[in-house]
Structures are given as C-alpha cells and as structure tokens.
Image (spheres, grey):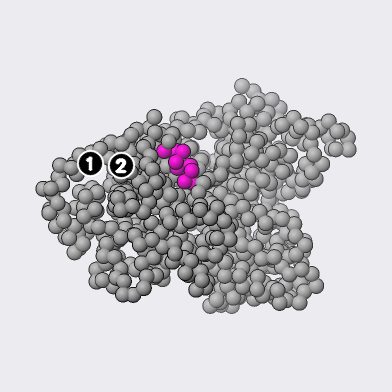
Amino acid sequence: MTSQPLRLAEEYGPSPGESELAVNPFDGLPFSSRYYELLKQRQALPIWAARFTFLEQLESNPTGVVLVSGEPGSGKSTQIPQWCAEFALARGFQKGQVTVTQPYPLAARSLALRVADEMDLTLGHEVGYSIPQEDCTGPNTLLRFCWDRLLLQEVASTRGTGAWGVLVLDEAQERSVASDSLQGLLQDARLEKLPGDLRVVVVTDPALEPKLRAFWGNPPIVHIPREPGERPSPIYWDTIPPDRVEAACQAVLELCRKEAPGDVLVFLPSEEEISLCCESLSREVKSLLLQGLPPQVLPLHPDCGQAVQAVYEDMDARKVVVTHWLADFSFSLPSIQHVIDSGLELRSVYNPRIRAEFQVLRPISKCQAEARRLRARGFPPGSCLCLYPKSFLELEAPPLPQPRVCEENLSSLVLLLKRRQIAEPGECHFLDQPAPEALMQALEDLDYLAALDDDGDLSDLGVILSEFPLAPELAKALLASCEFDCVDEMLTLAAMLTAAPGFTRPPLSAEEAALRRALEHTDGDHSSLIQVYEAFIQSGADEAWCQARGLNWAALCQAHKLRGELLELMQRIELPLSLPAFGSEQNRRDLQKALVSGYFLKVARDTDGTGNYLLLTHKHVAQLSSYCCYRSRRAPARPPPWVLYHNFTISKDNCLSIVSEIQPQMLVELAPPYFLSNLPPSESRDLLNQLREGMADSTAGSKSSSAQEFRDPCVLQ
C-alpha cells in the first residue's frame, strides 16, 4: 500500500501571524504560540538539515532499517521520534504507534516531557512514556518513550507484540543489555511474530557506526552534520588527584570566583561521590563573594527521580550539575559551558564463576571522554578540565563503552529468550557475544529454580517467572509464598528488595542512629525491610519521616507502586493470596521457607564464629555489610551461624548485603537434592549431607509430595 505524501507538522499551517486556524494534525487543535517558538529552536538544530533525507530513507528503504549517526547535542533524540510520528501519521497509524527506547528510565521521562512540549500535545495522551512503576500512556497514545528493558519484556511475552509501526532504538552506543538484545531479536530470522512492514531506526554515536553497519548488513545511514561551534581544548592535570571530590569542588569554586559565564557539568565516578560533592559545594558556595545569586548545585543520577527536571529549568543563578556516566550521552543541556571530568566510572561487573558482583573503578572510554568534552562547545568555546593526565586515556581507555551484556548476570535475559522459544540463547545474534560460561551459569541457575523442563525449555513455573519484573530467584520466592501462606509479606519484600533496599549511608547523628535501630527486626534484614515499609506507610509516606532516618523517600514511593503492580499481576494470573500475618511465629517460619525456596543459591556459613562467612557455592569468604542489623547489635551478640543473603559484592570489603538467619534443616528440605550434591567440597556441604541423611527416613514421603506440588504450580490463564 502506497502511503500518503509525507508532510511535517509545520507544513500543516502557517505561522501564527498568518492565520488563527492552523491546527495540529495529531489532535486537531490550533497550534499555540509556544509551538512556533520551539519550532524555531528545532530548526536551528544540526539534525534539521538531515530531515528530508531521513524521511526519504524511512519511506523507501526496502529493508525497513535505518541508521542515524550523530554527536551528542545534535537533536537526534528529540527530533527523530517526532519525524517518525509524522511518518506514521501519513500512514494513518495503520501499522501501530511509534515506540522509542531509552537505556535509562529518567531519560525516557525527560524526553517525553520535552517532545510533548515541542509537538504542542498533552503528555499522557498523544505522547507518553513507560518506565518502572509509571505508565503515563493512554488509549490515544501515538508516540511512546519506553525504558528498553520494559520493551524487551514486552517482546518476550505475548503482550505488546505487534503494537509498533516504527521502533526507534536510541542511544545504541550505551550498549545496554536490553538494547543489544532487542537488536539481536530483531535481526534474528526466527523472530517471526513481529509485525509486518515494521520500520526500525537505530540511533547512535558515530563511534559505534561501523559496528552497527556491519551488524545490520549495510543499511542506509543518515549522517547528522556536526553542531556549529568551536570545541574546547581540554586542560589536563599532570597527575590523578588523590581526592577526586575535593579536586572537582575546588575547580568549580575557582570558576565561580572568576565569574566565568555559563553552567558547569561535573562528572564523577559514583553516586556516593556525587552526593559528597553536592554537599560540599552547597556549603562552600554560600561563603563566596559574588555579584549575583550563589550557584545552584544539582545532582543528576538514577535515584533523583522526577527532581531531575530541575536541571532543565531556567534559573537566575548559575547551575552546577554533578553527575556520572548517566549523562555521557543523555540529558543534553545547552546552557553548559564548563565541563570538569574525572575520567573514571564505577560499574558493577558480574562474575558468573562465583555469582558475585565486582565494584570496578575504571577509565571511561575514549568515546565517552569525547562526548563529555563536546558538552562545552560553542561560540566562543567553554572549558573542559580533565582531572587526569593526557596519557591516562590514551594508554588505558578502550575506544568504546563496554557492552553490558558481557558484564551483567544474564539469568533474566536467558529467561526472556527462552520465553521467545529460542532454544539456545548462545545462538541469538548479539553485537558482542556474551561469554559462554555466563550463559551456562544462567541456564544452570534457572534449572536449579525449576524454571526449565527436562528438554531445556521453559517449564510452567518458568513461564510464570518470566511474567514478573523481578530477578528469577526473587520471583521464585514470591511464588513459593503462595504455598507457604505469606504472600502479603513477600509482596512487600519483593518490592523493597527491587526498589528500596534499605539504608545506603551511615547515620549522620546519634538521633538518626536510634531511629534506625527502632526499625530493625530481630529476624534479620529481610524482616527489617518489611518493618521499614509498614512504618513508611503508617507515616503517610511522609518525606520528613524518611529524611530523619536516612531513608530514600523516592525509592520507598517506588516500592509502594511496585508492590501494587506485583499484587495486580498475581491477581491477573490467578495466584493464591494470603492475609497479613507479619510478626507471628508461624509467619516467621513461612517467610524463611519462601526465601530459601528462591535464594538457596545464596547461603553462607560462619566458619569460625567471628563473622567470616564461607559461601556455599564457592570458597569465597565475606563479611556482613556495615548496614546489616546483626552488625548494629550490642556485644557480645554472635553473628548467626547460617545466613541467606540478597547480594554478594566484591569491593574493598567483600560483603553480604540484606542478610537473614536461616536453619540448615530448612535448606536441606527445600533446595533441590542435585544442588546440594553439586556443591564444592567443604565442611558446610558435609554438614548438609549429614542432615539430609538424618532427615531422609522421616521426611522422604512428605518432601516428595511437597516438591512435586510446587514444581507444577498454577499455569497462566
């Protein structure tokens, strides 16, 4: 079918001085004066020169795939979605809506707000966004911005397939697991359930263009002209400073003293350093003798939530935005004229051999360094201060960001690929193939969780696990709570573990420490999280209540929303629920059983009574996190001999986080027998085998019956 001639929104009506009847083709309402103000800004963007080339390729390219290559700040993330919407409008949206993926939820929301404003449309109606615990779309949504991991979940399930006429994969150079996987699935010839005549637009930084061109088979490429403006010459330090935060603060203060015009963008490795820098700068700038208002210091990281929009607001005072890798390519801020770059990033890298995350402080890529420098271009150019020597990046930095599919736990991804009936995840196309041992570890873990049948396909239980937006082991624990009558408590715990895992910094005062101790539960960190959530709800979700205890108010609000989503999902697939019983002795045992059913892979034993825990699945030794409730108890309290933990992180102090005591008999009863047999040789394994032999005669019959019932749970309706 031949589509109608392409006509852009500004072609539907004249300027406001020529006619008062010019209407928006998307909603039929007259254009506002702001639309024309923003249109002038859009037309000044570098990408505007490539508009007709892009639309021509989108219309006529027989493969349906178009690559767009351009530098950060060229306007590609705001304009490409609008042009795709205009392309779909010319077709009458017969093939579905336009969906645009982003690697970060904050970026999806921020872009939806901006694009709705530029298109003169209402957010939540014609333009919307979908991010965790926040679906701002409606039945009339034509252009949707979406976190790429949510879209991957939609592709893997039957829900949502065929809903798009144009799919835009933005910021491909970020190399998120979901973005790489979506490209692999779209490229895979076996993916036959996607809608016919689908258009795919892949938007990237020029550095990744050659790799993407080879991956997609030389599709047409739309090159965006470089943004006008001189590029700043970076100023390098002779050595790396011993205190990055202090060095960054002093550099910002020096800019303020010189009263150099323009806003400042500071790149630090981690959220912890961002918080320290913001606190220090907020104190220091008050003492500066400036002619105007003191600078506004604004953090920018994933935990900022909706407060991130403050970085776009017009202010009379200078803005100092302190961020990390989140803003390497996303969140273009035209007012930035000065960049201070630490040249480092702190990333979590998963090691499948020991099922642990490493906190790795490493140099950023050359591509990231260039993107940061370009933030300060202009007439005249701004400044770019690099807190490292020039040789640092030349000798140690990789050319491109590391693909996250090679650095994350792949259990959730493999579960979704199995849902797509891809028998061998290793055969799926990836831009960079994940390590075979990472895929094998993911398959082994899913097999232990009974998510796979004897043929290696998803079991009925595995199908249900893939429906939940949770890690597989947490989803298994939630399903086990149906059997053990503790669903209400496990719903709370699943939401808290996902969105608001407790305290993340030391108490700032003795009063705050006392308020925290009042929230601790004798049964461990998991019950403490439930207690924190219930107290938060009883406070009326009060932000001041959270601040007094060092809790993240935004994260707790997210946990509240997620709990509601999980409850709705369980009701939809008709899983049994249970009444609240938190605090009773029976509920205490039931909750432990549900946790062990999902987290038997994450159990450790205190080998010497001093808190040195040997992990069952390998012979690493770890200690309890400083935020663990067992650490805050008064001496001479002994650490529990056997614990279940949520996470094991290898860093400067190898630690287990979110820990609760369990009984080894419960592990023998609920873990698969072949899991216990496959444990590496250790005293802990010998003790468990002795317990299993002692319990064999008395529990064989009941255990066999219980295990079979749980292995064949309710199937999806």
- Label 1 element class: helix
- Label 2 element class: helix
Question: Residue 80, how many percent across, how many down?
Answer: 65, 42
Callout 1, which amino acid?
Answer: Ser
Res 280 quadrant in image: bottom right
Residue 567 among those drawn in magenta? yes
Residue 223 in view of the camera: no
Left or right: residue 413 versus residue 219 is left
Q: How many residues crowd around disc 2 within 10 Å: few (fewer than 14), some, or many (20 or more)? A: some
Question: Residue 370, how many percent across, how many down?
Answer: 61, 61
Which quadrant is the N terminus positioned in? top right
Left or right: residue 433 versus residue 509 is left
Most extreme residue toward the top is: 1
Q: Which mark is residue 191?
A: none
- Please tell me which residue lies in front, 175 or 464: 464
The residue under the point 60% across, 37% down is 137
Numbered range of the magenta stretch: 562-570
Q: Which residue is mark 1?
A: 706
- Please tell me which residue lies in front, 395 or 369: 369
Residue 213 in view of the camera: yes
Vertical arrangement, residue 716 with respect to residue 404, above or below: above
Give the number of callouts: 2
Residue 113 among those drawn in magenta? no
Callout 2, which amino acid?
Answer: Glu
Q: Which mark is residue 483?
A: 2
Most extreme residue toward the right is: 17
Are dots 1 and 2 in contact, CB under 8 Å?
A: yes
The residue under the point 33% across, 43% down is 485
- Going from the N terminus, do you reach mark 1 or mark 2 first? 2
